[in-house]
Amino acid sequence: MAKITYIEHDGTRHEVEAENGLTVMEAAIRNMVPGIDADCGGACACATCHVYVDEAWLEKTGERASMEESMLDFASDVQDNSRLSCQIKVSDALDGLVVRLPEQQG
């Protein structure tokens, strides 16, 4: 299990315990974190689970795949640390992960 902190655009924090093997998006949905819409259910077919990965965690969350890069074209305010949370798998190595949510999705 890993503890993940989701920070809404207004600064509201949500700390959740996420099971290994889930995605960061699935952990947010299961814990009713507002701001992660996940319209496609995690199929990397939309950009409604867009998050900003805290700089300290970029290396551990890995590189964006080409499909993820394509979907981020539909996200608002994409930054260098933007990721689709459906593409980040939870593992013990991500214990303490911090992600921030954009002001709006898609």
Image (cartoon, rainbow, N blue to C red):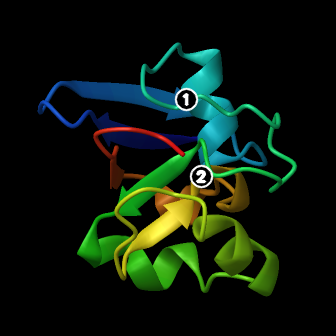
Other-residue count near label 2 (Cα within 10 Å), few / some / many at <14 / 14–19 / ≥20: many
Viewer-proximal residue, 86 or 94?
Answer: 86
Amino acid type of the residue that numbered disc 1 sits on in the rendered structure: Ala
Residue 11 position by quadrant:
top left
Q: Of 43 and 77, which appears nearest the observer? A: 77
Q: Which residue is mark 2?
A: 85
CB-based contact (under 8 Å), mark 1 and mark 2 = yes
Q: Secondary structure at mark 2?
A: helix
Sequence-first tag of 1 and 2: 1
Give the residue drawn at x 61%, y 86%: 63
Q: Is 83 on the left or on the right of 12, as rendered? A: right
Measure the C-alpha gap from mark 1 to mark 2: 9 Å
Residue 66 against residue 26 in the figure, above or below? below
47 sits left or right of 52 in the view: right
Q: Which image quarter holds the N terminus?
A: top right
Q: Amino acid at mark 2?
A: Ser
Q: Secondary structure at mark 1?
A: helix
Query: Residue tagged by mark 1?
Result: 28
Closer to the camera in the image, 54 or 2: 54
Picture coordinates of residue 31, whole percent (x, y): 54, 16
Mark 1, Cα crowd under 10 Å, few <14 / some 14-19 / many 20+, is: many
Q: Is residue 65 shown above or below 95?
A: below
Outermost residue, left side: 11
**Depicted 30 relative to depicted 99: above or below:** above
Report the residue that reaches farthest toward the top: 32
Residue 22 appears left or right of 17 = right
Residue 74 in the image: x percent, y percent? 60, 60
